[in-house]
Image (spheres, rainbow, N blue to C red):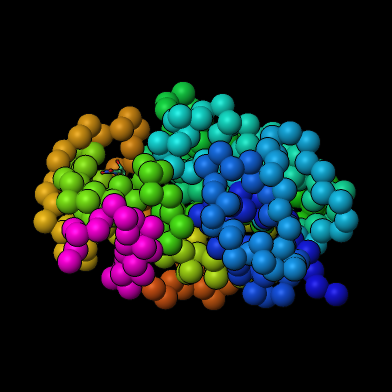
Amino acid sequence: MSKRILITGAAGFLGSHLCDRFIKEGYKVTGMDNLITGSLSNLEELFREANFDFYNHDISKFVHVPGELDYILHFASPASPDDYLKMPIQTLKVGSLGTHNLLGLARVKNARILIASTSEVYGDPLEHPQREEYWGNVNPVGPRGVYDEAKRFQEAITMAYHTYHNVETRIVRIFNTYGPRMRLNDGRVLPNFMYQALMGQDLTIYGDGSQTRSFCYVDDLIEGIYGLLLSDYVQPVNLGNPSEISILDFAQEIIQITGSKSELIYKDLPVNDPKQRKPDISRARKILGWEPQVDRKQGLTRTLAYFKEIMKEEIKGNFA
Ligand code: UDP
């Protein structure tokens, strides 16, 4: 009998890749999404699979799933700063009420639940690189607080369900991840730069571009999440690619890889934008034997092919 897994945020960037992976591994996959940032086009292939079904549901409301469940992956949430600034209340609700509902579901189904947390729990970090032991530097009432604090609450309630109700829980702290199926207009740096480069528009650098990020290719992340779910490790685990780059250098890489003639334009730095971010992945290495395999050049090449495909009407003629 194949195992059954519920994946929330199934129509999103990471959720849809997770659905693919678990279908490939022979699981029965039930996807759930309210489609406020996700898109059914990410699930097109999966709807042909007998082992896949889908609920259009907002998990901030009571969640009912008939039948048995072995695993739950909780990946529902706006995740781009632009999105969560536009939807602050939904972001808070899905991280808090939504997580509570899913933990309750895990408890009655006797299912193991893995929660998608984030490097944002470290806020604008004063420790570099970020280890899981670091408690973070978050402004609760700043614009990013709606996401950061929801995710911090999510970790707290997940640990409480583990401790008080013996629910089997896992927590992954996800650092910047990129790849096919990122939404073109989600406002994050990679889709913005790819779009601008392919359209021959100036790339928008927020601030002076000296802030850093560390970008992980989606396949590597999915591999790590798969390993963590099946591990017996309960404490949070960072997953990300430690290769750190400034946003300015990242813009140059995108211009180079696309062969674009775009130039740079400078805009205001968003409030509380973290100055640096790089995961310490010693724990993932030790517990999961996990290591990112795809470097930025390979990852960006694959991602570019995706953006060229979805933008093929708009960029006709730009790249003869
Ligand atoms: N950024 C930028 N130009 C853009 C979009 C983002 O310079 O068009 C910067 C942003 O200020 C941040 C970094 O790129 O320092 C990564 O932003 P993103 O929105 O991808 O996610 P974050 O890592 O901040 O959550």
**Residue 176, relative to residue 319: is it above or below?**
above
* Quadrant of residue 154 within the rendered picture: top right
Q: Please state the total of marks drawn on the protein image.
A: 0
Residue 28 rendering spot, x and y as whole percentages: 76, 66
- For this view, does 26 lie left or right of residue 38? right
Q: Is residue 22 visible?
A: yes
Placement of the C terminus among the 4 image quadrants: bottom left
Range of magenta residues? 296-320
* Residue 319 colored in magenta in the image: yes
Query: How would you classify the magenta stretch by its main secondary structure?
Result: helix
Image quadrant occupied by the N terminus: bottom right
Q: Position of residue 156 (x, y in %)?
A: 65, 41
Image check: 51 left or right of 152? right
Left or right: 8 with respect to 168? left
Q: Quadrant of residue 122?
A: top left
Residue 5, given in percent of the width and then of the height, sits at 74, 61
Front position in the image: 96 or 261: 261
Direction from residue 68 to residue 308 in the image, left or right: left
Residue at point 58% right, 31% down? 90
In-front residue for pair 82/225: 82
Q: Is residue 161 above or below residue 70?
A: above
Q: Position of residue 9 (x, y in %)?
A: 61, 49
Vertical comparison of 248 with 206: above or below:
below
Residue drawn at (51%, 54%), measured in percent from left and top? Answer: 13
